Amino acid sequence: MSLTALALVVTAAFLHATWNFVAKRIDTREGGGPQLVFLYALLTVVIYTPLALYFLAGQASWPSALGWGVITVSALLHYGYTLVLQRGYRVGDLSVVYPLARGTGPLLSSIGAIVLLGERPGWLALVGIALVVCGVLVIAGGERLFRRGSMHAGAGWGVLTGGFIAAYTLADAYAIRTLMLAPLVYYYLENVLRVVLSAPTALSRPTRIAVLWQANWRKILIISTISPMSYFLILTALKYAPVSHVAPAREMSMMVAALLGVRVLGEGEMHRRVGGAVLIALGVVGLTLG
């Protein structure tokens, strides 16, 4: 993986961990799910419309029919991912749900890239993928994740979220690497469709939208600003490096998320999670050299 791609992924990882931390702290008792998706997708469209128009007026081309098809599939997958992730945060710890989601996602993404996109990572990159996944599982709780108990529900939702991550990562990689769509325009249009998808359910209960916005507007504004930035950087990195390298490397966000979960949310077990962070760091080194 090139240094350019690595720099993009590192920056994206910090932004991604930050918005997930903010999302965990959103009060969804009086509204959430489609209402929350609708609000921050709509706000994302409002914030990034000037930049998208600038790109479209320049060198970025309008998507073809196939491009629109991929954008639609991605919008559906991102919508499902967001709903599942919110449910996981409702029943489990940030430092369980987030690491499992981010660990399962790159593993499945890498397998999909090898099988479907024809990528052939070297042995060092394969070792890096394995180290990242192991580090994520260590951070998330190790063997306890697979036992029935207080962590079990959060673990299940984390794995399901990872499946959505893998699916939309492959769809997005195809759009950027094969169809050559501009990353910012592609993700902007995907958010426009996400607004359309979430609007019918969200607007059926306008009171919940009002309550959710009143209680959390600052957090929603933060998410709508930095979440797209994070993903723009990942999509751009896919132009310089294969999916099987980028998807695991972005899990450096795990180190940040675990630290926030322990220090700020009081979720405990600092030593184990530091050990997992070391494994992730070593894995990223393997992906960079491989």
Image (spheres, grey):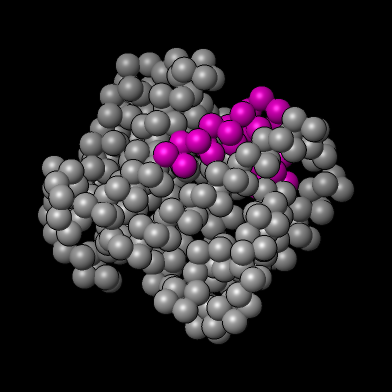
Q: Is residue 213 visible?
A: no
In the image, is residue 179 above or below residue 183?
A: above
Query: Residue 266, image x and y in percent?
Result: 21, 70
- Whether residue 25 sits left or right of residue 93 in the image: it is right
At a point 29% along the width and 36% down the height, the residue shown is 132
At a point 28% along the width and 29% down the height, the residue shown is 130
- Whether residue 190 sits left or right of residue 9 in the image: it is right
- Magenta residue check for 274: no
Query: Residue 243, image x and y in percent?
Result: 49, 29
The magenta-colored residue range is: 163-188
Magenta stretch, overall SS: helix
Q: Is residue 206 visible?
A: yes
Query: Residue 239, image x and y in percent?
Result: 60, 31
Residue that lies at the very extreme toward the right in this rendered image:
57
- Whether residue 189 sits left or right of residue 91 in the image: it is right
At a point 21% along the width and 52% down the height, the residue shown is 152
Task: Assign the C terminus to one quadrant of the image.
Answer: top left
Asked which quadrant contains residue 194, the reply is: bottom right
- Magenta residue check for 170: yes
